[in-house]
Amino acid sequence: MDAEVVVAGAGPTGLMLACELRLAGVDVVLVERLAERTGESRAGGIHSRTLEVLDQRGILDRFLAAGELQPVGHFSGLYLDFDESESRHPYPLMILQSAIERLLEEWAGELGVRVRRASEVSGVQQDGSGVSVGLRTAGGGSATLRARYLVGCDGGRSTVRKLAGIDFPGTPATMTALIGDVELPDLPEEYVWVRRCPGGDYSAIAFEPGWYRVIASDYGAAEHEGPATFEQLREALVRLAGTDFGMHSPRWVSRFNDAARQAARYRAGRVLLAGDAAHIHFPAGGQGLNMGVQDAVNLGWKLAGVVRGWAPESLLDSYHAERHPVAERVLHNTRAQSALARPGPQTDALREVFGSLIVFDDVNRHLRGMLTALDIRYPADGGHLLAGRRVPDAGLKTSGGATRVHELLHAARPVLLDLRGSAEVAAAHAGWAGRVDLVEARCEDDYWTVPAVGEIPAPAALLIRPDGHVAWAADDAGPPGVPALGAALATWCGPARG
C-alpha cells in the first residue's frame, strides 16, 4: 500500500479530513489537481458550529487572528439575531477561503500529511483489499496509488464521484450570478449591502479597506458558457445599479447559480464522498464550506477506526446516515432562499411577510440553528436530550488542567466525561481503556443551553464522540443510567477488549 487513505482535493474539506485522519495516526496522501493554491478568495465565512470544531482541535485562535467576527447573519438577505448563550462562538467569522486553506495546509504540514500536487485523479479501481487510484501528473505523466480507501473531496464536478458511478440527482439552475473581488471607490457611504432590482439584485461586502466582494444576480438566465470576466461583471452591475461605482482592479471573478444536487449515496465500497463532491447548492448563508468541514470531522474518526482495526466497516455506513439528511436540509433551505431572492412584486410581498415573522424569537431561533448547524441532532439511542447533539462547551475543573469541555477533544478521541465520580462509569469504561479517554471533572455550570431545546440540567456523565456529538448521556451515573453506556461504547468505539 502507498497509503492507508487517499484524499482527492486540497480544499477545506480535503485538508480537514486529512488532518483528522493524521490525528488518529492514519497514513494519508492528499492529491490535488492544481500545482499550487490559486489564492482565489471564494467562500467568505465560518459559522458557529465550524468555529466550535476548530476550537475542539485547538486551532481556532489561528483563524480568529486572520478574520473578523460579525454580529449579524441573514436568511436570503433578511437579518437574523444571534444568541450568545448557545455557543462560545455565536457570531460568524468573516474570513476568505484562501486564508482558510492556507491555515489548514499549515496544520496539515505540522501533522505530517503527505501532499501530491499537480496530480489529478483519472481512474478508480477497487477490490476486496483496497482501491487503485490512477493519477495524471505534471508534464503528461501518470502514476497509480494503492490505498485501503479513497475519499473524493474534489468539488461539485467530482471526478471521483463519476468514476465511482454515484448518481448526483437534484434540480437545475434557474438563475446565474457573477461574483468578483474588486475596488469600488465610488460606492456611497449609505449603501445597504444588498439591493433588489427589477431584473435581479446586487450586493457589495467589504472585506478589507478599499476593496469589496460584488455579486450581481440575473434571474433571466440560468446557464452561461466559458469563464466569467471582469467586463461581464461590470456590465451586469451597470445593468442592475445603473453604475459600476468606479469598479477596477479585480482580484478574482467567477460565477455561480442555484443548481442543487446531492450524491445518492456517500459511499460506494471503498470510495467515499465529502464536501461539494457530495452536495452543491445556492451559496446562500455561506453554508457550503462549513458543511464540508463538518462532513470531514464526521467521517474522519470513523474511517480511522476502520483503518486502525478497532471499528467494524459498518461504522462507515453511519456517515451517510448522519450527513446525507444534513445536506438534504441545506439544499432545501437554499432553494427557499433562492426563491425569496427572486425579483417581482409577489416575492416582495413574500419577503415582507417572511421578514415580519423573523422578529419572533422561535422563528429566528429555528433559522439561526439551521444556518449555523448548532441544532443538528444525529440519530441516537436513548432518550436523553443531549443524545445525538453537539456537546455544549461547559466550564470544567479537571485534574488534567482542562477548563472547558471542548478542550478535551484536541486529540480527536472519544471522551467519557464523568461529572459525578461514578464507580459504575469507571467500570463500564474498563473494556475500552486506551481507546476512550475517561475524564473525571466537576462541572461549573448547573444548566447547559442546548439550541432548539433551551436550558437543561447538566448531566451526570456523557460519552462524547471525536466530532463533538454526544453518543450517550445520563442524569444518573449509577445503575439506572449506566447500562446503556456499554451499548453506546460498542456502537461507536468498537467491541470491548477481552
Image (spheres, rainbow, N blue to C red):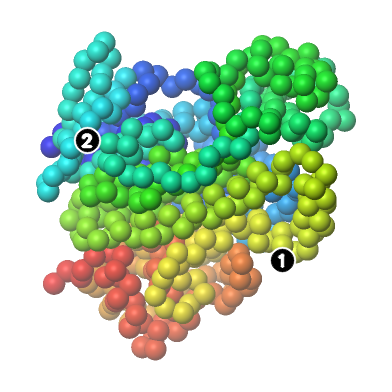
Number of numbered markers? 2
Query: Furthest-front residue in view?
Result: 220
Name which residue lies at 35% across and 51% down: 265
Secondary element under disc 1, as helix, strand or loop, is helix
Q: Which residue is mark 1?
A: 362
User: Mark 1–mark 2 contact, CB under 8 Å?
Assistant: no
Q: Quadrant of the C terminus?
A: bottom left
CA–CA distance between discs 1 and 2? 48 Å
Examine the image and state in which quarter residue 430 appears: bottom left
Name which residue lies at 64% across and 71% down: 454
Task: Let me know if residue 111 appears in the view.
Answer: no
User: Which three-letter amino acid code belongs to the residue tagged 1?
Assistant: Asp
Name which residue lies at 22% across and 54% down: 306
Choose between 99 and 220: the one closer to the eye. 220
What percent of the width, then of the height, locates residue 49?
A: 54, 52
**Badge 1: few (under 14), some or many (20 or more) residues near its Cα, within 10 Å?**
few
User: Which three-letter amino acid code belongs to the residue tagged 2?
Assistant: Val
97 sits left or right of 324 in the view: right
Name which residue lies at 77% across and 21% down: 239
Q: Which residue is mark 2?
A: 124
Relative vertical location of residue 337 with respect to residue 459 in this rendering, above or below:
above
Secondary element under disc 2, as helix, strand or loop, is strand
- Which callout, 1 or 2, points to the residue nearer the camera? 2
Relative vertical location of residue 360 with respect to residue 483 in this rendering, above or below:
above
| Pointer 1 or 2: first along the chain | 2
Task: Let me know if residue 236 appears in the view.
Answer: yes
